[in-house]
Image (cartoon, helix red, strand yellow):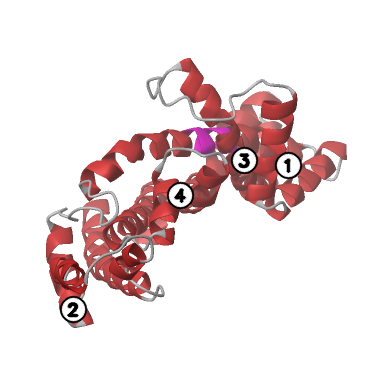
Amino acid sequence: MSLRRYVAKRLLVTIPVLLIVTLVTFMMSHLLPGDPVSYMTQFSEIDDETVQQLRAQYNLNEPIWKQYVLWLGDAIQLEFGESIISERNVTEEILSRLPYTVLLGVMSLGIALAISIPTGIIAAYRKDELADEISRVFALLGVSLPNFWLGLILILIFSVRLDLFPVLPPTSYPLLSYNMIMFTLLPAVTIGTASSALLMRLMRSSMVEELNKDYVTMARAKGLPERTVVIKHVVRNSMIAVVTVAALQIAFIVNGAVVIEQVFSYPGIGRLLLNAVSQRDFPIIQATVLMIGVTIVFANLVADIAYAWLDPRIRY
């Protein structure tokens, strides 16, 4: 099967998956106790007539299936209406937060790769030696420590005690300014550390497997320098699995950002979502969760295509 046909087949499979994502997104938001109008009546005096107008405005009196159909029709056109609480346009609200989450995700993935690849190479080449044991302990800590706990420890040490990083987001500065990147560094390290643990162990196991293959023995027998054998041949072949799993780590990073953004008061999508959940702001919840779900689906699609491009055998 050609790569083009493989991509077309994967895209067709993605369509029902996206429909399931929209259905789960919509149903989960309606499983929350109460609705936005009942939330608003807790904090202000609203007469019954206004309550009924609000419920009619947001289709809350319609059957649940009809609410889903109406919402899906708007979502396909990227029309998510207005926030019930802030009355701001939902799409504009999300787009204003999205660049911050993208910056956090890119830095987190970059930190994960910068830690995992060289550490995994050293651990494999020094198998069962001290360097391998240290990397094993680091990986165990990386997957064991809760992200939010690590984030709080980093804030306490580097922001409060050492005063090296700002505690609150410098929102008056541009996104790519020095101050904003410095503020993003600690949450990126928090997310990237856990992600690097898995990638490092994967890089190590792939390297160990490649180092024991016949072509490596033959390359050494031909007198090729050890650096050439390792970097040009072994590392290159070991990267196939790492690249694929790195793409899947985007889902892990996006999910981790929801909690970490709240811990660091980071002005991204995750914090917007948590605030919306506490206020039962359905349009924000549905649009944000849908965007996260679509991002994860397409990250998996990119991983599958990258794997098929690197290793044509899996297309069959």
Q: Name the residue under label 2.
A: 61
- Is residue 148 positioned above or below 297 on the image? above
Q: Which quadrant of the rendered structure holds the N terminus?
A: bottom left
112 to the left or right of 10: right
Distance (Cα) linking label 1 and label 4: 29 Å
Q: In this rendered view, identify the residue nearer to me: 188 or 132.
A: 188
**Residue at disc 1, secondary structure:** helix
What range is drawn magenta here?
107-113
For label 1, the residue is 124
Q: Please state which amino acid type lies under the numbered disc 4.
A: Val
The three-letter code of the residue at mark 1 reads Ala
Residue for badge 4: 254
Q: Do the residues labelled 3 and 4 touch (CB within 8 Å)?
A: no
> At 49% from the left edge and 44% from the top edge, which residue is drawn?
243
Query: Mostly what secondary structure, the magenta segment?
Result: helix
Measured in 3D between alpha carbons, the distance from the residue under mark 3 to the one under mark 4, in whole angstroms, is 13 Å
Q: Is mark 2 on a helix, strand or loop?
A: loop
For label 3, the residue is: 190
